[in-house]
Amino acid sequence: MKHPVRELVLLAALTAVLEAAKAMLSALPNIELVSLLLIVYTLVFGWKRTLAVSYAFTAVQTLIYGFGLWTMDYLYVWQILIGLTWLLRKADKAWVYAVLSGFFGLAFGALCALVTAAVGGWQMAVSWWISGIPYDIVHCLGNLVICLLLYKPLRKGLEKAAAVFRISV
């Protein structure tokens, strides 16, 4: 790491954008930009930086909203999305990441149910997950549409910014 201050500022800025995006759409249930941003961050800035940003995001969210089961979910769920994105990084098609983002939105409740199972058992986890399926469907469709609309301009803009600041993966 040649420029640790530059790196820290980058991570802080990327985290701040996640926080702002989450706050901006918080009134809409399960409509969010965080998934898309993490996908694009992974592709433009690499998985290591994006993991750091996801943990910083979780820490800030916990400071704002307090610790809950969702905190434990965020500690591993975002990393799954980052990992899958990294595996698909050679694909340069918006639809690939839109499908990934949509699938992630649909699977989000099931993934979060794992923590619920650890706390309250499988019956609680399954009932919690099933009751949330309508929200997961909204999450899926929202992620799919948002990614189709914003993936290319967001990626292009972040790639230009990375080039200006001489940041590489």
Image (spheres, helix red, strand yellow):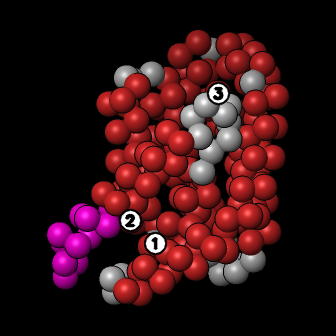
Q: Which residue position holds label 1? A: 46
Q: Which residue position holds label 3? A: 113
Q: Quadrant of the N terminus?
A: bottom left
Say what amino acid the circle numbered 1 marks.
Gly
Q: Nearer the viewer, mark 2 or mark 3?
A: 2
Which residue is located at x 45 percent, y 47 percent? 20
Q: Which mark is residue 11?
A: none
Give the distance between the C-alpha atoms of the residues marked 2 and 3, in whole angstroms: 27 Å
8 is within the stretch colored magenta: yes
Which residue is located at x 49 percent, y 75 percent? 158
Q: Main secondary structure of the magenta part?
A: helix
Q: Nearer the viewer, residue 159 or 103?
A: 159
Q: Which residue position holds label 2? A: 49
165 is within the stretch colored magenta: no
Look at the numbered discs 1 and 2 and tell me whether their residues touch, using CB distance below 8 Å: yes
Q: Nearer the viewer, mark 3 or mark 1?
A: 1
Say what amino acid the circle numbered 2 marks.
Arg
- Looking at the rendering, the stretch of residues picked out in magenta corresponds to 1-11
